[in-house]
Image (spheres, rainbow, N blue to C red):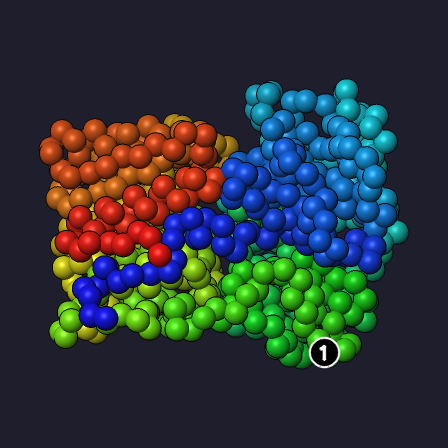
Amino acid sequence: MTSSFGSWPSPFTAAQIAQAAPRIDGALFVGDEIWWGESVPSEGGRITVRSSTGAEILPAPWNARSRVHEYGGGSWTADDEGTLFFVDGSDQRVYRMPSSGDPEPLTAPGAAYGGLRAQQGRLLAVREDLRPQPHRRAIVEIPVDGSAAADDDAVRVVASTTGFVAHPALSPDGSRIAWVQWSTEHMPWELALLHVASVNGDAMMSVSTRATLQPEWVSDDELLYLDDPSGRWNLRRVRVDETAAAPTPVAPADADTGGGLWVLGNRWYRPLDDGSIVAVRTNGDDRIVRIGTDGNATQLDVPITAGASIDDVRGSRVLVSGAGATVGAGLWCLDLDRGTVTTVTGGADADPDWVPQARPVTFDGPHGPVHAFDYPPTNPDARAPHGELPPYVVMVHGGPTAHVSGAASTAYAYWTSRGIGVLDVNYGGSTGYGRAYRERLDGAWGVVDVDDVIAAARGLADAGLADPARIAIRGGSAGGWTVLSALVRGGTFGAGISRYGVADLRMLAAETHDFEARYLDGLVGPLPEAESVYIERSPLTHADRIDVPVLLEQGSEDRVVPPSQSEAIRDALAARGVPHEYVLFEGEGHGFRAAETIIASLETELRFLGRAFDFEPRLGA
């Protein structure tokens, strides 16, 4: 059939997208089973734990969700006997759930926990206590007998700080512990140190590192970890003994094994018993490699190209999660000795007739190359009238120190199957292309990111791939800031969708949470010295320049970017009569999790673009 772009009939409904490809949240070998965390959108985004036997380990209403550093992570773990340990989202206490029995609390109410790790019969965690001033965080060992359930003082503190900590790792003999630590003045990708102490808390050493990630012991006195002194996060090895030898690089590559430490529990590599290492390498797309003891790396035949995580190893078997260019999000088990790859959950093949394969593209920008992934309109049953160019949505990720990779996405097929292209941009400041690309944004947030998304949009139009009059921009959080900042610039985008986006920098500095309290120092400048820059860069200051339709979406319980940000820009647009919509989703935080919210958001956005770009969208199948 012939129909205008944007009006094509599509089999992808918002309800299907809300239920498709649940997010995998960690995986472990447990006895003879494989367990993994999985989001349940139909239950408000609750995180459950499932088994390869088909059983649901963690029943409703329990929700394995940490709020440490606000973004959480590492909210569950297990021992080999089948005991589950998890942080419940309702009270942030740690619970123990035996293989046959109900959850019972291990920690007292008050503090929050995350980054759980069960090793050598011990349960390690990151504890965050926001009750005292200043707030304190610690690497702790939680008694598994329940003796600390009524008194948090019974939780043994290994290291405490007013800054931040992550990635606790216990040595094989149980005598030493390593972790990552950074101060409130820095983000972890700016300056984070590797610390080692005896298990009784006595400090042993602090390795001079720049942006440390994920320490892992390979013997009682030798550690692997990630750092980026060369400009790329690569593996390094260090001895923890009286020799005090300098760290040595392990198989350095022009790719990143590592990324922004936004959530606890990330795993970019795992050492194997034979001395080899399985690792993620990112240079735009993700690749999984095995690094031999000779330092040579061999790419493994795994269908993952985005969001890769090395979740667990046992013998020659490895659990890896992520998504791929031709498969949806899932979890796979690799047997390196047998050379087999088995799908554990998800990972369904994408129909190439309906789901476009991402095309990596690079555009020339004023600050250097701009990397992106193009998802063109794709529908085997529809075509547009001759000479018509498609509307496009330029997607802007959050962070801004985050990263997108090309992967099959039914969420994007929701748009492309209707005749709306998607361009996913890794603007300057994104990870996955090395430190120099990431640091392009230093002091220039609201300038470089905006220049880059404009360059990408114009490059797409100049190539004859998009209708220059019908390019929208959509982003959440820091991406929402870039949306509003780009609309203030004018001249490129015909509509904007800001999801819990930042509108005013001074308001953000005053209201945001601890983890990002000093983030703006590096992105913009310190206060009060840079206050004039904060005012000049803020979209709210120049809201009178916005002259295209704007959709604002916000969670009522967002503590990272509170509703006051979206409401301020809403009021400014209303005062000038600029077409806009404001949708507040009750009970949602920083990011939308509930199925009903995802459905309402997608359908609202599609209708909004139809009005803005004069096409009649079809919501149903």
Question: Which quadrant would the C terminus be assigned to in this image?
Answer: bottom left
Q: Residue furthest right?
A: 173
Q: Position of residue 35 (x, y in %)?
A: 72, 52
Residue 358 falls in image quadrant = bottom left
Q: Nearer the viewer, residue 489 or 569?
A: 569
Q: Is residue 331 above or below residue 111?
A: below
Q: Position of residue 28 (x, y in %)?
A: 73, 54
Q: Residues within 10 Å of mark 1 (few under 14, many from 20)?
A: few
Question: Which quadrant would the N terminus be assigned to in this image?
Answer: bottom left
Residue at position x 60%, y 20% in the image: 132
Give the secondary structure at mark 1: loop
Q: Is residue 399 above or below residue 129?
A: below
On screen, residue 557 versus residue 181, left or right, reads left
Q: Nearer the viewer, residue 292 or 4?
A: 4
Mark 1: amino acid: Gly
Q: Position of residue 61 (x, y in %)?
A: 63, 33
Residue at position x 52%, y 72% in the image: 254
Residue at position x 77%, y 29% in the image: 104
Residue at position x 83%, y 39% in the image: 100
Q: Is residue 225 above or below residue 528?
A: below
Q: Nearer the viewer, residue 415 or 580?
A: 415
On screen, residue 429 versus residue 104, left or right, reads left
Q: Position of residue 618 (x, y in %)?
A: 27, 54
Residue holding disc 1 = 339
> Is residue 551 visible from the viewing direction of this image?
yes
